[in-house]
Amino acid sequence: WDNRESWPYLSAWVTFALLEGKKSGFAVDEARLNRALDYLEHFVRYGQRTRWGTYYDETTRAFALWLLSGEKRGAEMFDQVYAHRDEV
């Protein structure tokens, strides 16, 4: 990643690929993986809106939280994400 605008939707899918690669035995840079997970956690926790709209924001938040949960992170945010289920 560089300093241009981030797209949480794409970042979630890239993080998924990194996690799946790691699970399959590929070498994954832990610092970069943690940076990606931190980014997703921030996106879920603080609920910022993107220019892509509510549907993509809330769908991405749910997906990101699912990824985080697989890493034993984010349990305290489930109610927050669930509250927006009608927007998905």
Image (tube, rainbow, N blue to C red):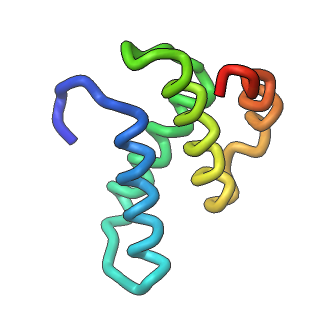
Q: Is residue 36 above or below residue 83?
A: below
Q: Residue at x 18, y 28 (%)?
A: 3
Looking at the rendering, which quadrant does residue 33 occupy? bottom left
For the N terminus, the image quarter is: top left
Q: Is residue 37 left or right of residue 29?
A: right
Please tell me how many numbered marks the rendered image carries. Answer: 0
Q: Is residue 59 above or below residue 66?
A: above
Pick the front one: 53 or 41: 53
Q: Residue at x 39, y 47 (%)?
A: 35
Q: Is residue 64 above or below residue 24?
A: above
Q: Residue at x 48, y 42 (%)?
A: 38
Pick the front one: 23 or 56: 56
Residue 52 position in % (x across, y down): 39, 19
Q: Is residue 18 left or right of residue 5?
A: right
For the C terminus, the image quarter is: top right
Q: Is residue 21 above or below residue 70?
A: below
Residue 72 position in % (x across, y down): 69, 58
Looking at the rendering, which quadrant does residue 78 occupy? top right
Looking at the rendering, which quadrant does residue 11 occupy? top left
Residue 69 position in % (x across, y down): 68, 54
Q: Is residue 47 left or right of residue 50?
A: right
Q: Residue at x 49, y 27 (%)?
A: 56
